[in-house]
Amino acid sequence: MIKIFGFESGKSKKYVSCIGGVVATATLTAGLLCSSTLAASTQVNPQDAASYTSIISTGNYDSLLKQLDDLKNQNPDESQYDRTSEAIELYQQHQLERKDKRNEAYEKAFEKMTEALDNERLEDTIVAAIDAHSLAENPNEFLNDPETRKVVEQAEARAKQSVEEEDWVDALSMYRLLDLLFENQNLYADQIKSAEGHVRILQLYIPQHLQDLYQARAERRAEEKGEEAPEPTEIEIDSWKTKLKNINTGMLRDSLRQAVRGHIDRNQPGSTGYKSLLEGGITNLLTLLDNKAVKEEFESLKDEMQVKKFRAYLVQIEDKLNQPGMTMNFLDAFKQIDDIIRMNDITVDLPEEVVIYEVTEGAMGQLDDFTAVIWPEDIEHFSRSTEGKFYGVGIQISRQDGQLVVVSPLANTPAQRAGLKAGDVIAKVNGTNTSTWSLDRAVREITGPEGTPVTLSIERKGEADPIDYTINRAEIEIESIRGWEHTETGDWNYWVAPEDRIAYVRLSQFLPQTATDMDNAISKLQEEGKINGLILDLRFNPGGLLSSAVDVSDRFLNEGTIVSTVNAKGERSIVSEAKKRTTYADFPVVVLINQGSASASEIVSGALQDYGRATIIGTRSFGKGSVQDLYRLDRGRAYLKLTTQYYMLPAGRIIHRKPEMKQWGIEPDVSIDMTTREDANALLYRQAVDIIRDKDGKDQVVEKDSIEVTEPDGEQVAEAEDVELDIIDDNPTAAKIIEKGIDPQLEAALLWLRLQNVSKDMPDASILQAALAPSEKPAE
């Protein structure tokens, strides 16, 4: 891993990229192969930076607290020393409580695992095993425990049985749970990919069958637990005919041609161009033919003789593609596709758009997780997600217990002004019952042209009859910047520790307006006084626009390359350089990251880390360091989002994660691990705090079941039902996040900045020596 180490050179401060650098306990020692100099905008003394991270990492505070006591005695009117001492003691207390809770939770999870195993509740067993593994002091030892091995064997057997029975929901669930247990080992990647393929087919072509499988799983889970089975939930889902409307062969041809020409890995060893893409397309068609349930939708697939004939033809092509030395150019590939379509017509006679869609999706799936076709029906949604605005009423919604529920109205929107509240149930939209609507359907119906009215019939706790709100739609800007807590007017307060002038800004995603919104937040803070520190929270931020990431980074750097890219030929191009005119005033910065920080988040955190402009606290980021370009398909009727380059950070790091890699992403300077349970608790509590409440404060809080912990590629890491969450109190506040130790990473960031604020007043003995001195022990 490349680290940036600092040294003083006259009046200017420079940072050198070194491979093999070593952080010693009291000094920074540069290693071998130092490369070109990076200019830093401003920075803390590197020895101080090392000392702060050492304090938080080792927890050795005794000498530091003694020095703070001396400073308090010398300056009795200076309250920041008291606050810092109290923060240290609270952090120590929370660390001890975390350790005790973790040990207790591990014992409880292990006991729950063995109890569930004895009572043949397999899913509860493996969920408890995942929980225990994340809590174990020695995770590898836990995985090799005989009880754990027994759990794994039974889960694997259950997954295989579900595959044989074509219960793809259960098979996928079991393999994903096993994958979570053996995190980052990719032991079940092939099985997961196969099951996902079948679930995708069910979801697209026969969604009711998929709903039935989910219902059967829910009933089985209820029976295992001795609980009452849940009522079936009916949800309207768009027909595949709508999804595949206006698809044609031109889109398939254009996507294949552009993928072979422009994909980042096209020149890598093992890349076989059109051959590999066609193999993926054929795999998708074979999966469709082998899925027995899909016959409910396509009558022609009931003719087993014709299915067998088409399948044999596809296998024959597959064998030909796998022959050693076989090559294929674009003419060969397109002729083969025409032959596949022709053979389909004379055998199973699937709709042509189905064949085109399956071949295209399978082909693009051979490349990487982020290459995808934006089909005609997806263009509007895709555009909305990148533009950062839409026209609607301004509410966050979720489905809870079969109902559409308002999670929170957005600040300064028509919904908030009209009086909608968190917890309101949207029973009807324009007179139509919403009980069977999907979230996508609800979004389509509630949004619409600017200035047009929409009537929401609201069922509210304490009200006997529904209340109709007719609201005119307006432009709603997606919120990408959030603060510490809402003010009474619904705006954001950004001070996490106002008495110490420490601010907090959360970036939920990188949109066109993100840098401007952050400018407004910083300006507001500076109007209220000097900023002595900023926590920039990028956790669970999946990324967004590259230009926005560059603009945000530019606010903290006054010169130097922010990010560059490397294409398939290994050619490096400069994307952007920092400009001094946009740089904020000098104040210390901590950036929070975790496994949910990806892409643009990694560009910002990586650039600030490389220049030494910020200290990174949290856990390793996701490792999505690739660039996707948009290409028109069939004269703009669809688009291909194609991975064409990798991001390169200022010090030369490429952070993109590939299956075979051991190192990826951004490694934090201070590693503070949080378990899945702690992540879910912190997310749940933060969502409850973020709700814009009525003046009486009686709005309902976010339901536990609405929380999911996911990774940026959309893969779900955990559902709330899979982890035991602490109970949210009746009056969640931002202050309690620190007071109760709900978010250890955030608490560490705040402590880091407080330590930096007081370090300038330390006596001759450096803060580093204080932190690393042996703890004072009472005389025996």
Image: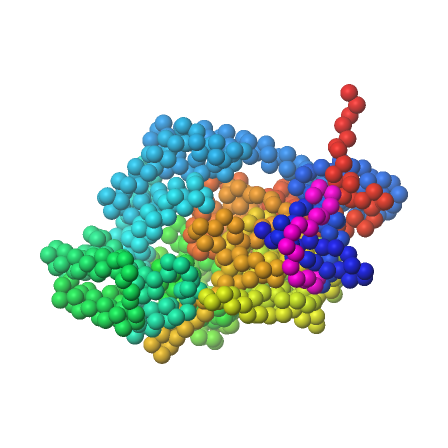
Residue at x 68%, y 46% (from the top left corner): 23
Question: Given the current orientation, which residue lies at the most extreme bottom position?
Answer: 635
Residue at x 73%, y 57% (from the top left corner): 43
Q: Is residue 362 visible?
A: no
In this view, the residue in front, 90 or 360, is: 360
| Residue 753 shown left or right of residue 1 in the figure | right
- The percent coordinates of residue 100 (x first, y second) are 59, 32
In this view, the residue in front, 398 or 16, is: 16
Q: Which residues are magenta?
A: 24-40
Colour basis: rainbow
- The percent coordinates of residue 294 (x first, y second) are 22, 56
Q: How many marks?
A: 0
Residue at x 43%, y 40% (from the top left corner): 181
Quadrant of the rendered image containing residue 137: top right
Question: Given the current orientation, which residue lies at the most extreme top position?
Answer: 780
| Residue 83 shown left or right of residue 121 in the figure | right
In this view, the residue in front, 645 or 267, is: 267
- The percent coordinates of residue 649 (x first, y second) are 58, 61
Using the image, determine if residue 299 lies above or below residue 70.
Answer: below
- Our reading of the magenta stretch's main secondary structure is loop
Q: Is residue 29 magenta?
A: yes
- The percent coordinates of residue 350 (x first, y second) are 19, 64
Using the image, determine if residue 470 lies above or below residue 539.
Answer: below
Q: Is residue 276 visible?
A: yes
| Residue 397 shown left or right of residue 239 in the figure | right
Image quadrant holding the C terminus, namely top right
Q: Is residue 32 magenta?
A: yes
Question: Given the current orientation, which residue lies at the most extreme right position?
Answer: 74
Residue at x 54%, y 58% (from the top left corner): 654
Quadrant of the rendered image containing residue 359: bottom left
